[in-house]
């Protein structure tokens, strides 16, 4: 039986739900659910997702979603489909672009507005020490056991750790997690997900309402998602017994053979463009 609702872990599905102007209320709701201290967001503005280094030769960052609220605080919302050895480091590096772009010419007092990263991960960290789905990181003063600065915050959602059934959901946050993880497997709207935001997600996600062009875009995006999954499965077969760098080259070769773009390969392996071109 064909799916009734889109897969939010596809690029098309993720952008359809969270990345369109008419649906930014959903993005605001999701951000405020994960960052309750930001519960006063009235509006957000989508920003350009590609950020270049200070020089052309420097590496660039491409965000899935990048926006700011009326206070000038920046929000990076990333969907990471494939495990990456240094994903934490990558997310921190990407956040620096959102800080640097706030620098003003001439005299500046370095009073930049907060930068908050939310990463929805279709995997778990290999060194994850706990069973919690959510990891939240800030700059912390270990000596005095207080937060050093709350202007830089990272929220990681290890979605494969979320295993609750619909009947086990305890709060609004868990409902969001359940919806994202199970949307494409549902054939009707569960009674427990009747809130306004979730009703809108189901309305947006119903494939039968798409025109032929939209449906084709989704099918292409779904194929892309499945191809990535299949390519990364080889990581465990062909990559057994070798180091992380060699494993990255194995994955990159598989992805090149399947016709993935250089940017896709960079995202999923952490290799540089020059390293990929030499394969």
Image (cartoon, grey):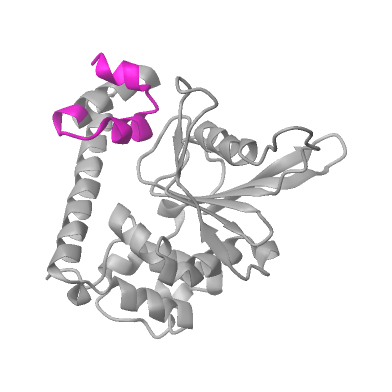
Quadrant of the image occupied by residue 254:
top left
Single out the residue that lies furthest toward the right.
144
Magenta stretch holds residue 61? no
Towards the viewer: 231 or 243 = 231
Q: Is residue 74 left or right of residue 200?
A: right
Q: How far across and down, in percent of the image, does residue 251 sit?
A: 26, 28
Q: Is residue 241 visible?
A: no
Q: How far across and down, in percent of the image, does residue 109 sit?
A: 81, 38
The residue segment tinted magenta is 256-279
Single out the residue that lies furthest toward the top.
278
Q: How far across and down, in percent of the image, does residue 23 sit?
A: 43, 70
Q: Is residue 69 visible?
A: yes
Q: Residue at x 21, y 71 (%)?
A: 207
Numbered marks: total:
0
Q: How far across and down, in percent of the image, does residue 33 sit?
A: 58, 66
Quadrant of the image occupied by residue 82:
top left
Q: Residue at x 29, y 23 (%)?
A: 240
Towards the viewer: 146 or 252 = 252
Q: Which quarter of the rendered picture does the C terminus lie within?
A: top left
> Is residue 142 depicted above or below 192 in this figure?
above
Q: Residue at x 38, y 74 (%)?
A: 201
Single out the residue that lies furthest toward the front.
106
Q: Which quarter of the rendered picture does the N terminus lie within?
A: bottom left
Quadrant of the image occupied by residue 101:
top right
Q: Is residue 200 left or right of residue 96?
A: left
User: What secondary structure is the magenta-colored segment mainly?
Assistant: helix
> Is residue 161 depicted above or below 251 in this figure?
below
Q: Residue at x 33, y 24 (%)?
A: 248
> Is residue 50 depicted above or below 217 in this figure?
above
């Amino acid at each position: 039986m064909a799916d009734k609702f889109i897969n939010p872990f596809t690029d098309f599905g993720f952008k359809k739900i969270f990345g369109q102007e008419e649906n930014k209320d959903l993005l605001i709701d999701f951000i405020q659910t994960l960052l309750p201290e930001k519960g006063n967001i009235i509006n957000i503005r989508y920003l350009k997702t590609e950020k270049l280094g200070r020089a052309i030769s420097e590496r660039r960052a491409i965000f899935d979603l990048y926006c700011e609220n009326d206070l000038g605080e920046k929000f990076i919302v990333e969907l990471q489909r494939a495990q990456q050895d240094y994903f934490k480091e990558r997310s921190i590096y990407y956040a620096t672009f959102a800080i640097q772009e706030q620098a003003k010419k001439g005299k500046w007092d370095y009073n930049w507005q907060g930068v908050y990263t939310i990463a929805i991960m279709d995997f778990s960290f290999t060194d994850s020490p706990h069973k919690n789905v959510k990891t939240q990181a800030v700059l912390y003063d270990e000596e005095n056991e207080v937060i050093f600065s709350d202007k830089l915050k990272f929220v990681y959602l290890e979605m494969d750790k979320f295993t609750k059934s619909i009947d086990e959901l305890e709060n609004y946050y868990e409902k969001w997690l359940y919806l994202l993880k199970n949307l494409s497997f549902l054939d009707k709207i569960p009674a427990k997900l009747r809130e306004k935001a979730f009703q809108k997600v189901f309305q947006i996600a119903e494939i039968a309402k798409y025109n032929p062009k939209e449906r084709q875009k989704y099918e292409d995006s779904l194929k892309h998602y499945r191809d990535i999954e299949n390519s990364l499965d080889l990581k465990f077969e062909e990559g057994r017994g070798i180091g992380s760098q060699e494993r990255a080259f194995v994955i990159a070769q598989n992805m090149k053979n399947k016709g993935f773009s250089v940017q896709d390969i960079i995202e999923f392996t952490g290799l540089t463009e020059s390293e990929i071109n030499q394969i």
